[in-house]
């Protein structure tokens, strides 16, 4: 069964360092998302991406965040200068159509980011 | 008011019990509604969509009341494997799915 894959599964970094989280969405999917979940809290929307551009972003997705689809398969989230409060599980997701139409977002297993 | 609010839980029930979860949403323009399930330290997975007419999938029944901006999920004949966190999900705008904090269910034998 096709799946969304994410790397790394866990990354530990020092405050102020740049981090890149990588995702390979399901191959025929057109919409890509990043969500984050701070331990014990809710799954929070960061950004959605379609047709090589951001289609929606939340207040959390400020200037320190950026996304890119550098080739036909990868979808990356970059955090430019990490803060302690960026420590969270970051989930990548993809969907065949806009998630709001079908609700079927397929999530990767997540990348746990720990900022020290 | 939060975009999506859920019963705080946790719900602790014996096997075979019927349990209901509630959810309210703040944006009356929301178009699509879903229940997702999240196991401990795992990714969310779609459980079922919620339609205005109500819908059922085996032991699971979802209801939507647009006038009250209220969504429910009923689980009948609970199984041990139903133990998880149930996330109410809404699309208030565009393509982004907005998640509630979730209600934790623990089913015991």
Image (cartoon, rainbow, N blue to C red):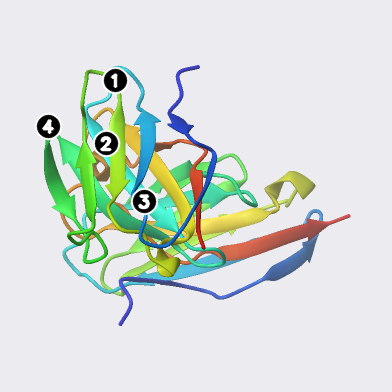
**How far apart are the alpha carbons under marks 3 and 2?**
10 Å
- Secondary structure, mark 2, is strand
- Secondary structure, mark 4, is loop
**How far apart are the alpha carbons under marks 3 and 4?**
18 Å
Tell me if A115 is positioned left or right of B108 in this view.
left
* Mark 2, residue position: A32
Earlier residue among tags 2 and 1: 2
- Secondary structure, mark 1, is loop
Q: Against B20, is B77 above or below? A: above
B44 and B71: which is toward the camera: B44
* Mark 3, residue position: A35
A107 and B26: which is toward the camera: A107
* Mark 1, residue position: A73
B60 and B84: which is toward the camera: B84
**How far apart are the alpha carbons under marks 2 and 4?**
10 Å
Read off the chain for label 3: A
Where is residue B2? Give x, y as percent: 33, 77
Decide: few, some or many residues near mark 2? Use Cα within 10 Å; few <14, some 14-19, many ≥20. many
Q: Can marks 3 and 4 be said to lie on one chain? A: yes
Read off the chain for label 4: A
Q: Can marks 1 and 3 be said to lie on one chain? A: yes
Q: Are marks 2 and 4 in contact (CB under 8 Å)?
A: no
**How far apart are the alpha carbons under marks 1 and 4?**
12 Å
């Amino acid at each position: 069964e096709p799946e969304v894959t994410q790397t790394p599964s866990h990354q530990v970094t020092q405050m102020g360092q740049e981090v890149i989280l990588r995702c390979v969405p399901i191959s025929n999917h057109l919409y890509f998302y990043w969500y984050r979940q701070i331990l014990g809290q809710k799954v929070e929307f960061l950004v959605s991406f379609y047709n090589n551009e951001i289609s929606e972003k939340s207040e959390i997705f400020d200037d320190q965040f950026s996304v890119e689809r550098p080739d036909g398969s990868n979808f990356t989230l970059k955090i430019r200068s990490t803060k302690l409060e960026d420590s969270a599980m970051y989930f990548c997701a993809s969907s065949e159509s806009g998630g709001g139409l079908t609700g079927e977002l397929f999530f990767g297993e997540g990348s746990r980011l720990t900022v020290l | 008011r939060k975009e999506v609010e859920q019963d705080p839980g946790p719900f602790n029930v014996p096997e075979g019990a019927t349990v209901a979860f509630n959810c309210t949403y703040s944006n009356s323009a929301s178009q699509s509604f879903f229940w997702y399930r999240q196991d401990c330290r795992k990714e969310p997975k779609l459980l079922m969509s919620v339609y205005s007419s109500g819908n059922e999938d085996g032991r699971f029944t979802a209801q939507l009341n647009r006038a009250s901006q209220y969504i429910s999920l009923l689980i009948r004949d609970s199984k041990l494997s139903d133990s998880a966190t149930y996330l109410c999900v809404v699309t208030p705008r565009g393509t982004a799915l907005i998640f509630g904090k979730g209600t934790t269910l623990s089913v015991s034998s």
